[in-house]
Image (cartoon, grey):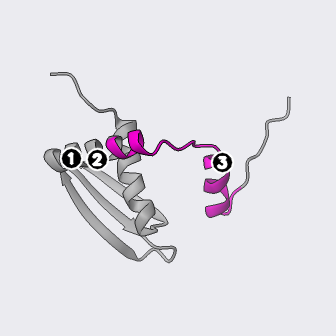
């Protein structure tokens, strides 16, 4: 049976949940029946742990897709926000 969802869509859905919580770093481990996710604050302290089995991943992805269809948002500025949040800057390549 072919996969219904891509890794990109799975990570996006989980990332949206973690963004809502306000975590600053994550660890994701694939398990036999799903994913184990940990989120940490800026001091490296554990903020959240979640275990997503296949059924809960499916539900999460479906609810994320439904919300995206209802409220489409542009990802303009996403890279900029990421760089600012993580105190980084984009470095150009000299040619």
Q: Find the distance from the CA under tag 3 to the CA under tag 2.
A: 24 Å
Instruction: Find out whether the residues at labels 2 and 1 contact each other: C-beta distance under 8 Å.
Output: yes
**Dot 1, how many residues are within 10 Å of its Cα: few (below 14), some (14-19), or many (20+)?**
few
Residue 60 image position (x, y, % from top left): 26, 49
Q: Quadrant of the C terminus?
A: top right
The residue stretch that appears in magenta: 66-88
Q: Nearer the viewer, residue 42 or 15?
A: 15
| Residue at mark 2 | 63
- Residue, x 24% and y 29% (percent of image)? 4
Q: What element does badge 1 sit on?
A: helix
| Lateral position of residue 84 relative to residue 56, left or right | right
- The residue under label 1 is 59
> Tag 2 or tag 3, which sits nearer the N-term?
2
Secondary structure at numbered mark 3: loop
Give the label, 3 or 2, closer to the camera.
Answer: 2
Callout 1 touching callout 3 (CB < 8 Å): no
In the rendered structure, does residue 26 fall within the stretch colored magenta? no
Of marks 1 and 3, which one's residue comes earlier in the chain? 1
Side of 47 where 95 appears, left or right: right
Report if residue 24 is visible in the image.
Answer: yes
**Helix, strand or loop for disc 2:** helix
Give the residue drawn at x 21%, y 58%: 51
Q: Is residue 95 above or below residue 52?
A: above
Task: From the viewer's perspective, tell me whether residue 87 is left or right of residue 70.
Answer: right
Residue 71 colored in magenta in the image = yes
Which disc number belongs to residue 77? 3
Q: Quadrant of the N terminus?
A: top left
- On the image, the x and y values in percent for residue 50 come to 25, 62
């Amino acid at each position: 049976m072919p996969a219904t969802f891509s890794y990109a869509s799975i990570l996006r859905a989980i990332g949206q949940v973690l963004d809502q919580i306000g975590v600053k770093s994550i660890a994701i481990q694939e398990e036999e029946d799903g994913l184990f996710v940990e989120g940490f604050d800026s001091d490296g302290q554990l903020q959240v742990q979640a275990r997503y089995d296949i059924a809960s991943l499916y539900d999460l992805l479906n609810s994320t897709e439904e919300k995206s269809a209802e409220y489409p948002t542009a990802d303009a500025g996403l890279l900029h926000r990421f760089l600012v949040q993580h105190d980084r800057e984009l470095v150009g390549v000299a040619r």
